[in-house]
Image (spheres, grey):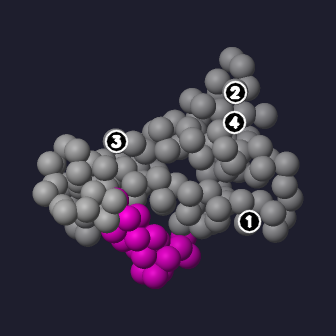
Amino acid sequence: MAKRTRLALCSCIAGALWGCLAYLLGARAFGQAIWGGVLASPLIGVTVGHLLHSSFADGTGRRRILWSLVSLYLAAVLFGTSVGVYELVLRRSSASSPTAVVIESIAAVLWGVTLTGFLLFLWPLAYLTHWALEWQVE
């Protein structure tokens, strides 16, 4: 299997697993709207894997730690965007400002990751995810 195809497949699986974790952590906070992010999680995994895997793989030490943090926040923004879009499109939200709904969802996810203490285990988990991808792809 080609390296790029293997990265996409492994990133898709990793994204799906992260989506399951997000559901467990955020279902009470987001309610049904969380399904937008959960359903998009495999695609989010592929996107983050495609954009950042080589930066992580080429780095060492502190750079890998930094790239894992960047990937965590990129994925969080994409997840929040997916939740907001789900809220708008599938649930037919009657919000006066669609942009505000999406931005509010992104802010809620970033708040949840950063200020609830989840960052303390999500960041190392992001690092381990990149490490596992590197191990599977190389």
Please report the bounds of the magenta region as a residue range: 102-121
Q: Tell me the mark number nearer the camera, choosing from 4 and 2.
A: 2
Query: Mark 1 or mark 2, which is nearer the start of the sequence?
Result: 2
Residue type, mark 2 in image = Arg
**Secondary structure found at label 3:** helix
Location of residue 107 (image quadrant): bottom left
Q: Residues within 10 Å of mark 1 (few under 14, many from 20)?
A: some
Query: Mark 1 or mark 3, which is nearer the start of the sequence?
Result: 3
Q: Are marks 3 and 4 in contact (CB under 8 Å)?
A: no
Q: Are marks 4 and 1 in contact (CB under 8 Å)?
A: no
At 77% across and 60% down in the image, what residue appears?
64
Residue type, mark 4 in image = Gln
Q: Which mark is residue 4?
A: 2
* Residue 119 % position (x, y): 53, 73
Q: Tell me the mark number nearer the camera, choosing from 3 and 4.
A: 3
At 81% across and 63% down in the image, what residue appears?
63
Alpha carbon of mark 3 to alpha carbon of mark 4: how far? 24 Å
Q: Main secondary structure of the magenta part?
A: helix
Alpha carbon of mark 3 to alpha carbon of mark 1: how far? 27 Å
Q: Which mark is residue 136?
A: 4
* Residue 29 % position (x, y): 26, 69
At 42% across and 76% down in the image, what residue appears?
111
Q: Residues within 10 Å of mark 2 (few under 14, many from 20)?
A: few
Query: Mark 1 or mark 4, which is nearer the start of the sequence?
Result: 1
Q: Where the C terminus falls, by quadrant? A: top right
Alpha carbon of mark 4 to alpha carbon of mark 2: how far? 11 Å
